[in-house]
Amino acid sequence: MERVILSPKQKALRINLDPEIYGIFAEIGAGQEVVRHFFRAGGASGTIAKTMSAYDKDFSDAIYGREKFGRYVCEPRLRQMLDHEYQLIIERLSREKHPTKRFFAFANTMATIDFQKRFQGHGWMGMKFQTAADKEPNTVVVHIRLHEPESGLQQETIGVIGVNLIYGCYFYHNNSKELLKSLYDNLNRDQVEIDMVQMDGPDFANVDNRILSLQLVKNGMTDAVIFNPDRTNMQAADVLYKKNILTIRGSFRPVTKVNFDMILKGYNKFVTEPRVDKEKLQVLFEITLNNLSADGEIDEQDFIDRADILCTLGQTVLISNYQEYYKLVDYFSHHTKNRMGLIMGVDNLLALFNEKYYRDLKGGILEAFGILFTRDLKIYLYPRRESDDSELITTKNFPVHPRIKPLYDYLVYNGRIVDIEDHDDSVLQISSREVLRMIREGEPNWEPMVPNFVDTIIKSNQLFGYHPDNGNKSTNDNGKSGGEKVENSEEKEA
């Protein structure tokens, strides 16, 4: 049955009329709009214990303490607000007098578009709330980007999404995906983008926040999400701001030795660049939504299998809807002006120079390459060898179409596309697809094709369809088995 979408006024009134929902609103910066909906809906005295607006920075610091880096529109400030206000309501209201009240603290810290329209609005919004009087609180935190051209319009949007968050926490907490979708009730992507979400607490104990990140991209709420090796969802600016960025795209299904040789050798070459600071370098393993849905519908367990391995190996993962590389680089350039690097196999570079991917652009491939190479970007080509006796494909004999070859030659000549020369020739013919097939069909000797410990992770967690009774009995005591040649090239991802 399709969910009925209520108006902000209807949602606010339903909450106001619930005698057990009671809490605090704290809004700083430009986010002074949420509590207004509850006042205007009627019956607010039964819901609102306190509302406050610490618009002045000195007052905000006096109440919540100074944030480490002196910022105000950031996640740490939001969490300080939630913890402080929730603790106040617990301390000041007696449980003996209010035995059935479900307390909450709602907070936001927002910045809207400036007068010169140089900076788009964005901010953090969160809810700390009980679903029963005797339960520990849950916390939901989101980061939003505001796309409307006027400050007043953005403030109205903040009010609506705030009402949606409070309503969703109380009425959809038992369905995290529905809660996430409900944030867009009475809104659309042209108005607001949600690019980070984190749900924690007893009612979300079985929720994997990485799945919620995937839902953000899948549902069109944003085009890219990031989570760190601790499996925590991250806001892009916190990860990428003023960083050198090195990215490798693939299916990583599973991650193989060729993937790690690509990233290792690409990294070693990237850090020798004159405008690269190793201390401010972020490496990303990117999986596109198109890749995740290559077999039809997105398989969430398959996604988690890939993510678990990369996180266990200490990698930061980017999930994006940027099938074309120029869109990915444009996304990065919103967060950094520093040098970026893309590590590609031969097939990825062939796709980059394929004109069919740019038919929707008025300037075609030249417009896309203008976006790519007006940034401080270098592409590192990992070679390919089809068989033991075939020629190694590098930038020197790359099979680009004759019509595009002058553009390709220009980029190679100017050092924008360079070879990874110290590759490991012994792994060139490993294919993720072949390894995946062997795992699923119970064939032996796939273990030497994946990095150390990856085979152990796959077996112990039974990832990618592995089952100990599937015929995988070739492994010796140290978890490895004798090598077997694989007839294929490096992972092919467009």
Image: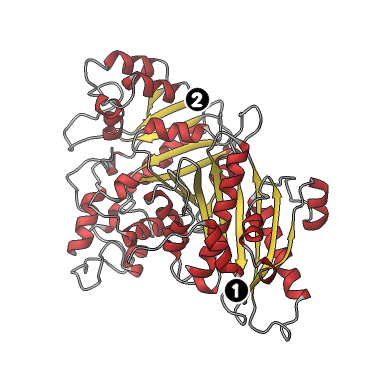
Going by the numbered disc 2, the residue's amino acid type is Asp
Amino acid under label 1? Gln
On-image quarter of the N terminus: bottom left
Q: Residue at x 68, y 45 (%)?
A: 30
State the quadrant of the C terminus.
top left
46 left or right of 262?
right
Mark positioned earlier in the residue sequence (1 or 2): 1
Say which element carries label 1: loop
* Mark 1: few/some/many CA within 10 Å (<14, 14-19, 20+): many
In front: 228, or 176?
176
Spot occupied by residue 464 in the image (x, y as percentages of width and height): 28, 61
- Describe residue 108's horizontal placement relative to residue 91 as left or right: left
The answer to whether one can see residue 443 in this image is no
Please name the residue shown 52% across and 41% down the image: 282
- The answer to whether residue 85 is above or below residue 270 is below
The structure residue drawn at horizontal position 54% and vertical position 53%, both measured from the top left corner, is: 161
| Image spot of residue 74 (x, y percent) | 65, 48
Q: Which mark is residue 130?
A: 1
In this view of the protein, which residue sits in the foreground, 170 or 160? 160
Number of residues whose C-alpha sits closer than 10 Å to that of mark 2, classed few (under 14), some (14–19) or many (20 or more): some
- Disc 2 designates what residue? 376
Closer to us: 4 or 138 = 4
